[in-house]
Structure formats: C-alpha cells, structure tokens
Amino acid sequence: MDKIYRYKLIKLAIAMPLVFSIALVLNIQASLSFFGPLFVFVVIWLFPDPIELKRFVVQKMLLVMAVVSIFAAFIASFSYINSVIIFLFILLTGWGIKIWIPVAVNLGLTPIGIFTAMAVLRSSAPYTTVVYMMILISVGVVSGLLVDSFFWPVYSSRVIEKQVSQLFLTLETLSQSAFSFERDDSIYNTQILQIEKQIQAISKAFKIAIMTHSLSSTEQQKWEQLIGLQKKIFLHLRELTDLTHNNKNNPLLNRIRPEISLLNNTLSETFLTLAQVTLNPPENLLLPNPNIDLQRWQRSLTEMREDRETQSFDLISRLNVALIEYSLESLVKIISESIALVEDSSTEIMINQSLDNQKNQPITNN
C-alpha cells in the first residue's frame, strides 16, 4: 500500500474514536451522531493534502453548512415537506452556493450541503437538529484538521520544494540525453511527458499556495521566478536534444565532442546540486558554474575558426554547430540565473536565521 494512504488510514484510526467519544459525552441523538465521523473522513481522506488548502475549504464548508441548514430549518418550520418542496430547495441552494462560492469549491461542497440539509428538512425539530449537526460537523472538522496537522502534515510550500527538486532531477536526465548523441525515441518521449506532468503539478501547487496565502511575498516571488526558469530550461534542453540528435553524424561536432562532454558533466552536477539545494538549503552554498566550461569549449571552437580548421568542413556542418553553440549559450544563461536566484534566496534565509539567533540571545550588562 502507498504510504500516503497508509498515513491517512492511521489518521482515521486516531480521529474516529475521538469524535465518537465526544458525541457520546455531548449526548447527541444517535440518528445524527454519524455526522462527526463523516466529516473526519471528508477532511482526512477526501480533501486535498496541503494543510492550508484543507483549512481554506473547511472555512467555506462550515459557511455553506450553516447557511444551508438554517435555510432548511426555516422552510421546514413553515410548510409541510414533500418531494416538490425538496426539489425546489435543492435547486435554490445549488444556485445560491454557486454565487457565494468559487466553482472549484462549489462542486465539492454542494452535494455535502444538500445532504446535510436533508436531515433538517426531515426532522420534527429542525432548529434543534441544526444546532446538533453544526456541533457534530465542527467537532469532526476540527478533529480531522488537528490530527492531520500533527501526524505527517503536508504543507503547500513543502510540496513545491519537493516537486521543484524532483523536476531538476528529471531535467538532469534529459540533459544526459541531449549530449549522448544517441536517442531512444520511446525513452525520450516518456521523459518529455513526465516533465510536462511535473510542470503542471508544480503550477497547481503554486496556485494553491497563492490562493491559501501560505507563502510570504518573498517566497512567492522566488518560486514564481524559479518555476519560470525551469520551464525555459526544459524548452532549451528539448531544442538542444533535437539538434544534437539530428547532428550525430556531423563531422565538426564529433571533432569537438570531448570538450562538450566536460560541459555535460558540469551541467549534470549543477542540476543535481540545484535539486538538493531547493529541498534542503545548506549553510554554505557553493554551486558549480557551467559557464566556465562553456567558455572553455567556445575558446576551443574560436581557435579552430581563427586557424581556419573549420573551413575543411562543409557549410551545413558549421551552421548546425553554430546553432548548437547558440542553444548552449541560452541554456547556460538560464541555468546561471537559476543559480543566482537560489544563492540569493539562501543568503536571505541565512541572514534571517542569524537575526533570529541574535534576538534569542540573552542581553547582558557589562
């Protein structure tokens, strides 16, 4: 079993008895006592994993439950309930929720809101039922959130870190393909599809973090820039892979392949280091610089041009090598921007930590 589902089962095993016990102590009628455990299940099992998003949806959900239940009690106290009235009530509450709540949240909360309102409509004491239901729902929701927050919590900022780190690892694998000059199309297409899915997942996690206000303005700016740079790296690596694959028989390119292999090793090391740094920033940050190896390779190519060695190769070969050189320059430039961004953000973290340490130090009088 996947560890995520195992963790959720453990959380349910902890929270469910807790809510049952509270319902027994409060002596709420048996026909309604299932609402507490039901909403524990909803919060822990059905709601999206980030804690901030759970809290955001819970606030909306409690609002919907309260408004819909009180509205249902109002209708039930003035009229005999039949199927026509229930149908009209469902249409009216669905329309109201659609106006109050964003569509993404509305789709999940409308069925739950209508389901809980049915108990009120069918009750002989609707307002008492509303009070009992709101107590049980609140107990279930709060218990689910507390257990979810204390046992293996998932925060959207941490999700972004893990996904950005994993994408750098996948980009490192793609960079190896770009310089191997031999490409397996099935493996390559799988890599491209995997990276595209990872980029979509990162964008989704970032939107959740913005929506739930779980990132500071500095963190939001940092991740937005870094995610954008990763997208550009992916596009340039894809372009470079196509160029090297189409030029695997280029005699001029094969002549300077040893110098390219050094750059490839540095790029690989850079991606691996970026993956590590974005997940666990070290105190002393030192990232490899692929620009040095690029300049070394360009100097070798420039010397060949000045000595007219490249004139012995046909024009198509020389033009394609120039295209590869331009693509490499663009790729290394973007990677250098990523390195600078990570270094700056890590420096800010170190400065903030040192300031916090100074605040915590006791003041002594000389």
Image (cartoon, rainbow, N blue to C red):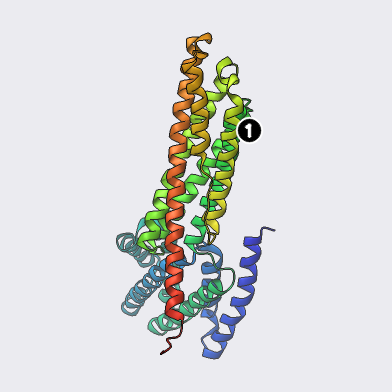
Q: Note whether residue 114 is visible.
A: no
Viewer-nearest residue: 300 or 265 = 300
Question: Residue 55's x, y, as percent?
Answer: 44, 69
Viewer-nearest residue: 250 or 224 = 250
Q: Note whether residue 289 is visible.
A: yes
The picture quadrant where one finds residue 219 is: bottom left
Question: Residue 205's x, y, as percent?
Answer: 46, 55
Name of the residue lying farthest toward the front: 366
Question: Residue 43's x, y, as percent?
Answer: 51, 68
Q: Which residue is mark 1?
A: 187
Horizontal side, residue 266 vs residue 98: left or right: right
Quarter of the picture containing the N terminus is: bottom right
**In this picture, is 346 found above or below 225?**
below
Question: Residue 128's x, y, as percent?
Answer: 41, 85
User: Residue drawn 33% across and 74% down?
Assistant: 71
Disc tally is: 1
Name of the residue lying farthest toward the right: 1
**In this picture, is 189 found above or below 272?**
above
Which secondary structure, mark 1?
A: helix
Q: Residues within 10 Å of mark 1 (few under 14, many from 20)?
A: few
User: Residue drawn 49% across and 67% down?
Assistant: 51
Viewer-nearest residue: 156 or 86 = 156
The picture quadrant where one finds residue 20 is: bottom right
User: Residue drawn 34% across and 65% down?
Assistant: 93
User: Residue drawn 37% across and 55% down?
Assistant: 221
Quarter of the picture containing the C terminus is: bottom left
The three-letter amino acid code for the residue at tag 1 is Ile
**In this picture, is 173 found above or below 76?**
above
